[in-house]
Amino acid sequence: MIQPLPTDTSYRHSPDAGDPDCLCSRCAGRILEHEGPLRMYTTNGAGEVDENSEEYRYCEKCMAACGIISYGGIPEWAPGSHEIEDLEEDPEEGL
Ligand SMILES: [Zn+2]
């Protein structure tokens, strides 16, 4: 797992991946548009994210170094996952 380290940088803004300001908390490298950065937030005393929360975000390279990747969707081999049947298209739709 990845955990924020004291040496990581936290941010008070949350630009989209690909934005020049979207920098990795760990390596300070730009997070590119195709990456799915891992974002974590500090919480207030009630365990909620609020306007004082700070964001830690990690690029794919730093995630990979910690043994994790971001994944688009739920893999079939994930515990408890099941295949979703393709919805049959209604041939009359759109007529
Ligand atoms: Zn990084």
Image: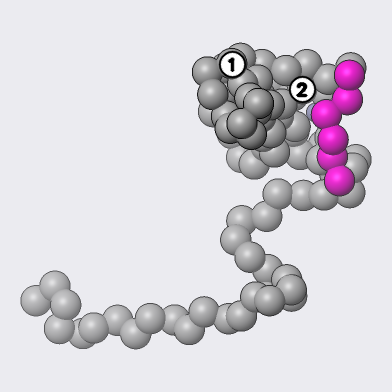
Check whether the beta carbons of the residues at disc 2 and disc 1 lie within 8 A of each other. Answer: no
Residue depicted at 59% across the width and 16% down the height:
52
- Residue 15 position, x and y percent, is 55, 22
Q: Quadrant of ligand 1?
A: top right
Q: Is mark 2 within 8 Å of ligand 1?
A: yes
User: How far apart in space, not on screen, are marks 2 and 1 (Cα)?
Assistant: 17 Å
Residue closest to the eye, 61 or 83: 83
- Choose the circle earlier in sequence order: 2 or 1: 2
| 4 inside magenta stretch | yes
- Residue 28 position, x and y percent, is 78, 18
- Quarter the C terminus occupies: bottom left
Q: Is residue 34 above or below residue 43?
A: below
The image quarter containing residue 66 is top right
Q: Residue furthest left?
A: 95
The kind of residue on which mark 2 rests is Ser
Structural crowding at the residue carrying mark 1, measured as other residues with C-alpha within 10 Å and reported as few (<14), some (14–19) or many (≥20): few
- Residue 38 position, x and y percent, is 69, 38
Q: Magenta stretch mostly in which secondary structure?
A: loop
**Residue 67 visible to the viewer:** yes
Q: Is residue 5 above or below residue 63?
A: above
Residue depicted at 78% across the width and 16% down the height:
9
- Residue 72 position, x and y percent, is 61, 56
Mark 1 sits on what residue?
A: 52
Residue closest to the eye, 19 or 57: 57
The numbered dot on residue 25 is 2
Q: Which structural element holds mark 2?
A: loop
Residue closest to the eye, 73 or 53: 53
Horizontally, residue 21 falls left or right of residue 59, namely left
The stretch in magenta equals 1-6
Horizontally, residue 14 falls left or right of residue 28, namely left
